[in-house]
Image: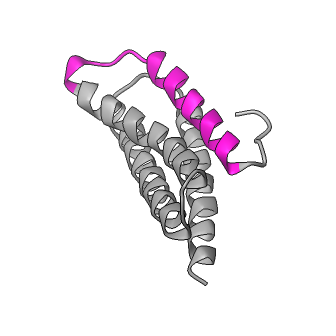
Amino acid sequence: MSEKPFDIKHRCYHFSKEMVLFISSLKYERIHFSIMDQHLRSATSIGANVVEGKAGSSKKDFRNFYTIALKSANETKYWLCLIRDTNIVNVGKDKIVELITEADELSKIIASIVINLNM
């Protein structure tokens, strides 16, 4: 990813876009379709829940959507690590490591927001 946007909503959107482009560029066996499908769902869920949270009607609503976004970010890291470690796809490890790093950074940012909401 190039320069990262400051706003978490935009950063999540760019990550979702990167994941869609990444997965759509891959060739993989039919048996691995469910892994890729679930991976795409969790990756795009991060930003969707951040947007929902920002539009929430209460602090509790906001916190709940951000907690779901955090869970999705952690799940996305899981799927990326699984893809990296099983060689399901023939792609350079550098790209996967870059995506894992961004998912980890998003996870830390969202976790910090959730923790600060509870103070």
Where is residue 44 drawn, in percent x and y? Answer: 48, 37
> Magenta region: which residues?
8-31
Please identify the dominant SS of the magenta region: helix
**Residue under the image location 69 percent in, 40 percent down:** 10
Q: Quadrant of residue 30?
A: top left
Give the quadrant of the N terminus: top right
**Residue under the image location 49 percent in, 69 percent down:** 60
Where is residue 71 drawn, in percent x and y? Answer: 42, 57
Q: Is residue 37 above or below residue 78?
A: above
Report the side of 59 relative to 3 (left or right).
Answer: left
Q: Name the colour scheme.
A: one colour
Q: Is residue 27 magenta?
A: yes
Q: Is residue 100 visible?
A: no
Give the quadrant of the C terminus: bottom right
Q: Quadrant of residue 87?
A: top left
Where is residue 93 drawn, in percent x and y? Answer: 53, 34
- Residue 67 or 18: which is nearer the viewer? 67
Marker count (numbered): 0
**Residue under the image location 56 percent in, 66 percent down:** 111
- Residue 116 or 60: which is nearer the viewer? 60
- Residue 116 or 87: which is nearer the viewer? 116
Report the side of 7 relative to 14 (left or right).
Answer: right
Where is residue 94 drawn, in percent x and y? Answer: 59, 35
- Residue 66 or 26: which is nearer the viewer? 66
**Residue under the image location 43 percent in, 46 percent down:** 76
